Amino acid sequence: MTEPLQNFGFRDSSYERAEQPWECGRLEGGACAGGPGRNGACGGRTACRPLRDGAGGGYRCARLKEDGGACTEGPSASGVCCLAALGCQPVRSVRSRRGLVVRLSFLCTLGLLLALLFGPARDEFVSPGDLSDPHHRLDLACSACHGAAEGSAASWLHWAVDVDTSRDLAARCEQCHQFVDHGAPQNPHGLPTDHIRALQASLADEPGVGAPKVLGELRCGACHQEHGGRERRLTPSSDADCQACHMRTFTSFTQGHPEFSPRWPLKTRNPVAFDHKAHYGGLFAQGASSAGSKFAAWGEPLCTLCHVPDADGRDMRPRFEAHCQVCHGGQVGYTPDSVDGIALRFAQFPMFEEEARPEGWPEALGAPDPSEVSISPEMEILLGRDRETVEKLLARMPEDERSPEGFLEMGEEAKPDVSAFLLAMKAMLVELGQTDRTRVLAAVARRFKESLGVELAAAEQERLWPPALQERAAQAQRLWFDEEGEDTHEDGFAFGSENFSLDLVPTFQAEAPARAHGNPTLQAWAPYIFAQLERGGRLEGERLVRAIPAGLQRCLKCHNVDRGMDQRLHVDWSGREKSRGRRLDRFVHAPHLGQDLAALREAAGKELGWADIPSLKRNTTMLNCLTCHVPTKDDAHDDFFVHFFTREGDKPPLGRTNARDARANFGPIARALCASCHTQGKARSDCLTCHVYHPGPRATRAPKAR
Amino acid sequence: MPAVTRRPKRWDHPFDDTMSEAMVSELMTLEPWKGLAAWAHEELKPAQAEARVKDLRRHLLNDARLLTCQAGEIVIRVGDYGNSAFVVLEGAVRVVLEANVGLGAAAEKRFDQPKRGFFRSLAQLWTNQRGVEQRPAPRGDARAAPSTDADNAPVEHVPIVLSDVPAVLDHKRTARIEAGGIVGEIAALGRSPRTASIFAEGDGTRLLEIRWQGLRDIRKKFPPYKTYIDDIFRERILLQHLRATPFFQHVGDTPQLRRMLEEDRIADVFIEGLGLRPSERDVVTLEVAGQAVELLPLAQGRGWSGSEGIVLWRCRATIPAGPARVELVRALCEETGRKAVVVHRLGAGRVWQWCLAEAGSVEDADVHECEEGGSRGPEELMRRLLREIALHEIGRQTDFHSYGEVDKTQLGDGDAAEPVIVEAGHYPDGLLLVRAGAVRVSRQINRLERTVSYLGPGNSYGLRELAHNWRHPDRHVVMEHTLRARGYVDTLLIPTSVVTRFVLPSIPESDLPESYPEETDSPLDPVDVFEPAAGVDRNMVEFLVDRAFSNGTAAMVIDLERCTRCDDCVRACAQGHDGNPRFIRHGPVHAGFLIANACMHCNDPVCMIGCPTGAISREPTTGQVAINDPTCIGCATCANNCPYDNIRMVQPRSKDGVFYIDAQNMPHMKATKCDLCVTQAGGPACQNACPHDALRRVDLSDAGTLMDWMKR
Amino acid sequence: MSGVVARRARNASLLLGLSVAFLVWHARQLEPMAAPQRFTGWLLLGLVAFLALYNARKKIAVVPLGSSAAWLQWHIYAGLFAVLIFFLHTGLQLPTGYFETGLAALFLLVALSGIGGLYVSRRTPPRLARRGEEVIYERIPRLIHALAEQAKALALESVATTRSRAIADFHAARLSAWFSTAQDAWQHIVGLEGAARRRARALAEFRTCLGPDELPVFDELTVLIAQKEDLDFHRANQGLLKYWFFVHVPLTHALLLFVVVHVILIYAFGGAR
């Protein structure tokens, strides 16, 4: 029979005090009643306090029954308990030891963290991983991107709580990466918040992408995640990042993606008005078939004659120099001997009768041809504040009969006004022709401000008034107002002496210094000329259209004028896709042009003409331009080109912003067409295949040189 | 150095600090104290008498308090656990005789000690003592230095008042207890729940509330008072127990009585059938509602201890229903004594009308009426009357017996410690009803004593033998089993003659237990009252009963297959008790279940019996047994009495860890035990703190509860 | 114990369902969000805080805050869920920086120790319940000491009663050191019985050398040895139940520190996007 180890009687066992940090360390018998104190000192040194018996003065044991009853030995004569040695070394309870370990490990961790966070290897310690390769190669310090890394770890709480760290981070991205044409780079797509709000409102009901969610700033870090290791690409590759804002999601490009706008890819009209039908169907075809034509050498009149991918492989548009110049070079004064058509007239004198001419009237002017006399808008701009002298003269004419002839009808009574005009012209020429370049540009800026109220940037001043024009002004001043004028006249003026002998209104024409097409001075002047003409509604009506300088008129034959977002008239001189900088979609032609177009002809089995194009597209499975760009039979195009080139009827060539007028003979492209290839397993179909986040040319997003 | 202080004494904490000698003197002029003093002077030697009366005065001073109640104020609520009795000094109280339903919202209110709120629960985390068993220095006599400690103040008397007393009086059977009467003594002395609700009848009802330990001592010191209390007990409790016993359902409904009733032999029904005696009273003529009513005495019962008992009267006149009948009964009771039953026959319609006036309550005497077309048929009313009288008669002849010792040292040491209640082979001398405790039923099988079952409160033994002997007078059997008391057992024994006369004839033949077969060689299975229900592990039940754990209503059972021995329960307990655990996580184990050394809050907490100060008491509503630490004087009576060693004596010490000792160098002691976290908002902290659901406070009196939990 | 099995099945399937639902939701809803890691990060922080709060809940046992058992259930399943969220948060990639490697390692160690602790606290109690007398851990040294004293007394007594030094010598040589402290902790924890078997064999061999009057004494000694072995078993396994917290809890505290630094770092360095 095994004796039980424990007895549960109330005298044999006392409470086990699990909540106390110390346990009685006594092995002999049970734990003593006293028990250790909280400080771990033994609380049970003696078994009892012996009791002094009244009679003999001796002591007797007073140990409690609970503690084991009176001991056999009894107390000493002096009343000391014989079991006084019962004291033990209390031991810590397991739980108390655990508490110590917890506290110790907590302190150690805290110490370790503090040492590392405030130590020299801090940056290495907290870095969550290597930078991607391009950044890694730069060997950037943490503080290049993180403001918090500039201070000690003590400042991090401030950074974490008080600072918009992602803005700080983005600002530091922008220190290296510039975003030309991007508006505010931290805004979604660089668009202004108002614009996004407007988009939100307009897209609220539109199926597909739906209204974007984020209105505030969208920082670089939202898509570009660093510290993913050297191999990690920084550009996002998943649709998820797009769908973070474009909440109305769809499964894929093939399923659920909204249809393309019927205006796509020709949402706005072309920067250059070009009639494919006339060129391709007419001229090229004829030329190719007739020997000796200058087109004969080109061979088959295929699209690729003119449409060649650019360096990006993206843009297929023809270039003037490469494609148009062959035929149209002379029309835009490409050769130096045909500069007349593209001149600016910044100084003109109307013709007055003798009696109206004041003293000092330039003799060199000779006799006028009233029909050629006008006050050019560029001269009005340059007159600046003195423009009022012109207005005074004009005021002398009847309201409805203001014409160059009107100047000739003025008599002696007009002499003071003519005199003022003369002085103003002289002052202008002196100022703009002086030798100090800085002063000239300051004068140009002042005069533009006085007349148009615009502040010109330094580069703009330079473009508007190149040194050549400064020289011209000096020459004119010398010719008209200098004593020695006659001599300098010989020095190879661009305008011949016949101007004077013909008694025409003498005109200083600024010709392009290098080549006429793409003349930067003309391009720079164009918007200011439009602006000047728009003042007072002078662009209305056929008559004043002719006020556009003849050279500019030549440009506008092909280059469309459009009203921009600033409500001013602009010409897109690039001849490229309009508003390229703001387009959020992209199409790169090059990858789509894998097929040899010659093969098409073979497949068609005959010579191809404009009329054959639709059938061509149907008959081949091979990808070619016509697969996507389907020629239309819309007569509206024909009308457009008629109006534009002949300038018949009432339609002005300017301000036409109705895109339908310029669809360039091709119909819209359907999504299903793209989706037939861009579907899972065949070709990429994620958002970023066709859409870009950062608008603008790719090159502008490259890091700045350091 | 230990701190030498005065040892706490019994009356350091009187029931009510405001009781004064003058008030005691006033009380001494009232019954029953006046009578008790007179008895002492008559019966005892002068010195002795002087001492007794002085004791009585000290009890009144320290163990009693005066209450003044408003009309409808609930004094006692049925089901609550009471620690005191109430003596009516002025006015009257009403005892609600029917079940407690319909007393209204007031009756639902709790007398409980307020639980700690969330923030007080939280606060104890840092107000708890950090050391072991630390106590403030014991204070002296509270009367000298009134307590300011809110925690240790006696429970404030908060009146809970019935909103509509007249409605209760109209719709409930109530009994009226007038000045001099006592209520609440049974629960107080018996450590059992209150059996009825009692409320004050009118405003300004004055009551004297006596703590149970005071009442116990007075009862011990004054034999007349003991007789008085015992009689009341018999009258109030015994009948209730009998009424609740299933096979007494039909007493008073024997074929013999039915035949007599059919033959219209009313007097014989009571005298022959129910054993009353012919009444010696004279005819009474009363003036009721302007009409002279003549009442003939029919028969007379026997009272409990020499009192007159019930008297049946026959009424010759026709009394209209309503107040007139009430008036008649009141007048009759006033005229003749305390109890009366009026039987009235209305011609050939065989409609009976009877009014039973309960003891001392005349005005709203329990008037049962039956008119033609009434809801209760006359036969049914007559049956009820006969049953009441029969039960009364049975009760009068029933014997009380108590067995076993409270002292736990006698437990579990074999037969010697288990007093025999019924011996196998003896002639069945009566029907045994178990009132409290556990009874082991065993029998001799192959010369070995084998336990076959256990009886608990409410169970009975012997009906089968008695029924057999009654049906087979020629072939009597003897008791087949031996019954022994496991610990403290209270029984009732109804003599064979009474059972034969009242009980057996009334039980339908189909309900009577089977007779014993002729061949007694093959002993029958016993009537297995304690047979565990389906799915209950018999071994576990035996383990529980064998160690008398089935007494516990909230034993701490730990599933050792789940317990990770983390001691979270112990720490939680300590947190709830000022930094000290109140149980030990050890104890007997059966089948992987450990019954820990924690107070089980017994059905019948024998620990309370000897407590001299009443420091140990039951919570009014829930019945948890708790020790009031300041009142405890460390006598260890409770710890010695607890059969399960669940009370532990500790040595309190000061904040500095210095033991308190008395002049004899003996340390002060305090009894400590689990209080089931009565004051904690979340209930038992041990159970809540167990992360693995391995610890549960289980009511072991119902084995099913444990089994359900074991199989969870 | 079918109730427990049912509860585990229910809770585990609930967790699984929740996890799958969360993963689906996360894949559909969270991925497109600008900051999926911010969401999972804060969720994880909340979970870790909740998990750590269990320790606090245990310390304030009397405050009515729900039963500890319910808390543990939440603790276990929230812990498992936190592991899932952790992997979502890290994108199933190993962190590359030193600090973040430390953080991840701490999290995984805490999670692993928790799962290990769960295993220990499910496996060990039934083993304890089946073996020997149920004893309170803190009492074991005292009980072992008592057994050692008994064994010693028995051995000394045997010299007088049997007039032979065999048992006393055997005790001195083979048993007294073994009796002095708890032994073979790892064997008891793992469940190996090599040492016990060797000892039993040695005892059996020794028994064959004893005379008839020595046998009863020796058998008494054998009982003491068996009791001591049971105590060793309890000491080792109850100890295991207590000591696994020595890994889980301190690591949790270290983890919390790291988490705080992590959050500050992420926000100070703009990592929260």
Image (cartoon, grey):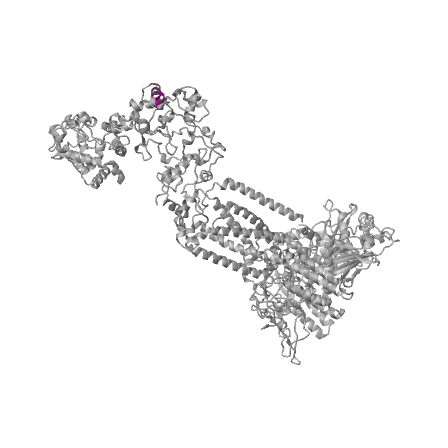
Q: Residue A365 at x, y = what percent?
A: 14, 29
For this view, does C209 lie left or right of residue A289?
right
Could you say which is closer to the camera, residue B630 or residue B61?
B630
Vertically, is C177 above or below B293?
Answer: below
- Residue B292 in view, yes or no: no
The residue at 79%/61% (across/down) is B420
> Among all residues in the image, which is located at the extreme right?
B474
For this view, does A361 lie left or right of residue C171?
left
Q: Residue A674 at x, y = what percent?
A: 45, 30
Could you say which is closer to the camera, residue A512 or residue B429?
A512
The tally of labels here is 0
| Quarter of the rendering containing residue C209 | bottom right
Residue A280 belongs to the span the image colors magenta: yes
- Residue A21 in view, yes or no: yes
Segment colored magenta: A278-285
Could you say which is closer to the camera, residue B27 or residue A379?
A379
For the stretch drawn in magenta, the main secondary structure is helix
Q: Quadrant of the C terminus of chain A?
A: top left
Vertically, is A550 above or below C138?
Answer: above
Q: Residue B597 at x, y = what percent?
A: 66, 60
Vertically, is A516 above or below B111?
Answer: above
Q: Residue B115 at x, y = what percent?
A: 59, 57
Q: Quadrant of the N terminus of chain A?
A: bottom right
Residue B609 belongs to the span the image colors magenta: no
